Image: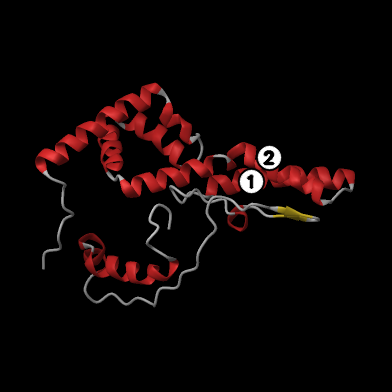
Amino acid sequence: IPGNPKVTNDDLPTLHHDIVKNDPFVSRALGPNAKMERMKAASLRLGGVPKSFGPHLILTGDAAGFIDPLTGEGIHLAMVGGKLAADRIAEAIQTGDYSEAMMSKYHDAWMAEFGYEFKWSYKAARMLYKFPVFLDASCAMIQKKGPAYLGEWAQVMTCQKPKSYFLKPSIAVPLAIEVVTQMLKQAVLGTPKPPSSSK
């Protein structure tokens, strides 16, 4: 699980059960007599695989790890990766060359298109785990700036815009100010507690 080095895939059923039983919103939505099957989970590759090609072979989508480590987004990346794969396959058919060298061009193409973003997503996930105040500040910024800002934020979170968008001075400076504001609020008022379930 990105960001939290203490949680493993073996912890997922316990976490799932805890959310279902103890989260007031989820437990209320399901009701007291909800019948649920035992949770089954498998890990997904996050952040791309080191090698997504071979002779006569191209991996794309989940098989190639096209899942953003920060957001879990993968649909847009799979579509872009699929288009890049189709382009490479079309070239291979035209030339009759299905060699590893030909297929490696596909790997280079997706790395240039979006693969470089994965390392930043890993770092951001770790940072948000250690400093959740950044999430508070981000939510406050979205509330202040409104739907247009939320739309731009969503484009970054769905991998339609690069994460470097957050480094633009028009975004980074107000966000940094909001982080400091949130830290001061939490220092003075205390860290907000999650709502408790009332029974």
Cα–Cα gap, marks 1 and 2: 9 Å
Kindly identify the residue that appears in the image at 15 percent across and 37 percent down: 185
Q: Which residue is mark 1?
A: 81
Kindly identify the residue that appears in the image at 32 percent across and 48 percent down: 130
- The kind of residue tagged 1 is Gly
Quadrant where the N terminus is found in the figure:
bottom left
Colour scheme: secondary structure
The answer to which quarter of the image holds residue 166 is: top left
Mark 2 crowd level (few <14, some 14–19, many ≥20, 10 Å Cα): some
- The kind of residue tagged 2 is Ala
Residue 145 seen:
no
For residue 29, the mark is none
Q: Is residue 179 above or below residue 61?
A: above
Mark 1 crowd level (few <14, some 14–19, many ≥20, 10 Å Cα): many
Residue 91 seen:
yes
Q: Is residue 72 above or below residue 173?
A: below
Find numbered disc 2 in the image and state the secondary structure of the residue it sits on.
Answer: helix
Q: Position of residue 157 (x, y in %)?
A: 44, 41
Q: Position of residue 169 (x, y in %)?
A: 39, 22
Find numbered disc 1 in the image and state the secondary structure of the residue it sits on.
Answer: helix
Q: Is residue 82 above or below residue 41?
A: above
Q: Is residue 33 left or right of residue 80?
A: left
Q: Position of residue 102 (x, y in %)?
A: 81, 46
The tag earlier along the polypeptide, 1 or 2, is 1
Name the one closer to the observer, 93 or 177.
177
Q: How many marks?
A: 2
Q: Which residue is mark 2?
A: 109
Kindly identify the residue that appears in the image at 50 percent across and 40 percent down: 159
